[in-house]
Image (tube, coloured by chain):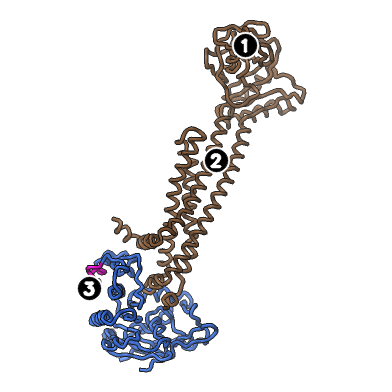
Chain colours: A blue, B brown
Amino acid sequence: MPPADPPVRDDERSPAPDEQSPATDERSAPGGKSAVTPTEPSSPGDESAVPVLETRGVGKRYETGGEAVEALKDVDFSLAAGEFVAVMGPSGSGKTTLLNVLGLLDVPTTGTVLLRGRDVTSLSDRERTTARKRTIGFVFQNFYLIPTLSARENVEIPRLFDRDPSTRADAEALLRRVGLDDRLEFRPDELSGGQKQRVAIARSLVNDPSILLADEPTGNLDRKTGRQILEEFDRVRDRGVAVVAVTHDPLVDEYTDRTVELVDGELTR
Amino acid sequence: MRRGFGRRFPALLMARRNLRRTTLRSVLAALGIVIGVVAIASLGMVGTAIQQTATTTLGDIGNEVVVSPAFQAGVGRLTDRDVREIERVAGNSAVVPVKSTRASVRFDPQQELATIYGMRNPGDIYTASDGRIPDPLRSGALVGADLAERLGVRPGNTITVAGDSYRVVGVLATQSGFSPVNPNSAVVLPQTAFRSTGYSQVVLTAESGRAANQTAMAVRAALNDRGQRVEIFEFASITRQIDEFFGLLNVFLLGIGFISLFVAGVAILNVMLMSTVERREEIGVLRAVGYQRTEVLRILLTEAMLLGVTGGVVGALASVLVGMALNWIALGDPLFVFQPRNVGFLLLALVVGVVVSAASGLYPAWRAANANPVDALRK
């Protein structure tokens, strides 16, 4: 059952075509007032029916070299709890842009993004960062581990500033879960590609997110290692975390609940 | 313990690891601060040492005031009335009226033309290195250190001054510095040996340079208010001028120090900018995993401050060594470096070093914190 329509602000729907350029695409909340427009779920017991993440009519326009590029066009996308969705499509089809919008790293030019039914489109950078930290984990093609920190410290990174004494134990438990309990104090350059990606997965899970977003997670890995990573996602999904993987890799298809395809910024399937 | 420390200060942990990643670069950046801090602190100490040397030389007479008759106004002698007036306003200062002339001094077989002072109470301003100074001086003669050496005179000898014989009761200690009433090459006789009336000078010795200045002003007010009667030669004013000169010199030296710290700041700015450009993606990841801009800012500022604190502390230690060497050469006492003024310079240098580093880190940190993570993570 879909939730009640959130109040949508007109200016979000139809901005000037070149209002947002990639360099300045962060919206600040208008005035000092919170821009959050909470949407009440239809009833408290109904929450499981609310998609964890949803986009409505999302479009994203970039200005590159005086030329407007429409990276996303009117994308409606919905993600249920514990669902594993692959976003496939050729290079330049807007997959990464979609992932950035889903991950609250980027703000759409048009349309609305709902996180657990709450409109998060026009949050301030600080609020968006907080929401991202609480609910979303990221896994990247290039792993992006901090080379100066050990595997365990890399997993602790997202919570390092919380000064939470349980972080260390949680990080170790997560590394154990991905089979790296014998590599806790290894630096990234002492780990294989598959091990690095597993550290990255552990890092994405340390804040206990409900959504995991992966950008080409198997892109830099051989087939066998890629499978191990996908199996890891499968286990993550079993724990109720929704996973969205943007990929070229047909292998991913075998593990997902559904696959959507993005062509020239439009969701076709 | 170290790990616990990093846990309590996560920004410090990350900053330390980042700096260690490019050790040479970090060391060079910190070296700039070391040099700047050493420049400020040791140049300040140079100033202190020079000033100390100068004031030590002048120290003996810095609290002396000499009152002479105003020859230009036609006053040739100071009278007993003048002396009483001076004694009245002099407060705690010792007042020694002096008569003076020049005469031949003979101690066979040598003979020399020397300054002869007549004083009632020379013990108030001089000390004896050999023999004693009777107080008051009624008979006998006191011989200045240099003259006594040239003539080979010792207490107990008899010298002839202008034809009269005097028994030497004491040899005066060498007095450093310069003064219109300098005893080193002179003979001090009782005032009764002079037939003339009036005095050529009155020497006042105060407890301190400041007191000497006050006494000088009081004497000037009392004796010169109805026309110029006396001239007052006050050494404290010379010391003050010397102090002012060295103050200026110090400011100049400090200025050089600050310029080198400024250059060090530019070096840190450069290093931090390079470092943030290189770590663009890492910083993007931090933002992606939920770091606020302020947290990124904190990490990078901590990095810059760490460079500054490390450089500053090393610089301060180096400055102490430099200062000790300097004081050993200039004053023969390396420990003289530990005086409040120099400690002040050290603290100033350290604080300025850290502030300069933090200020230099501000722009790179701000830029990195406000970079768009989407751009940073674009493949």
Residue depicted at 47% across the width and 65% down the height: B274
Residue B325 visible to the viewer: yes
SS label for mark 3? loop
| Depth order, front residue of A164/A151 | A151
Q: Chain of mark 1?
A: B
Is A171 covered by the magenta stretch? yes
In this rendering, would A12 be left or right of A41?
A: right
SS label for mark 1? loop
Report x, y in % for residue A40.
34, 84
Calculate the distance from the C-alpha at mark 3 to the C-alpha at mark 2: 66 Å
Calculate the distance from the C-alpha at mark 3 to the C-alpha at mark 1: 106 Å
Report x, y in % for residue A94.
42, 86
Q: Quadrant of residue B250?
A: top right
The residue under label 2 is: B47
Evaluate if marks 3 and 2 touch, with contact meaning CB atoms under 8 Å apart. Answer: no
Calculate the distance from the C-alpha at mark 2 to the C-alpha at mark 1: 45 Å
Residue A179, numbered label: 3
SS label for mark 2? helix
Residue depicted at 55% across the width and 33% down the height: B53
Tag 1: residue type? Answer: Pro
Which residues are the magenta region?
A170-183
Q: Chain of mark 2?
A: B
Residue depicted at 29% across the width and 58% down the height: B4
The residue under label 1 is: B190
Q: Chain of mark 3?
A: A
| Depth order, front residue of B144/B199 | B144
Q: Are marks 2 and 1 on the same chain?
A: yes
| Depth order, front residue of B174/A227 | A227
- Crowding around mark 1 (Cα neighbors within 10 Å: few <14, some 14 to 19, many 20+) is many
Residue A240 visible to the viewer: no
In this rendering, would B288 be left or right of A48?
A: right
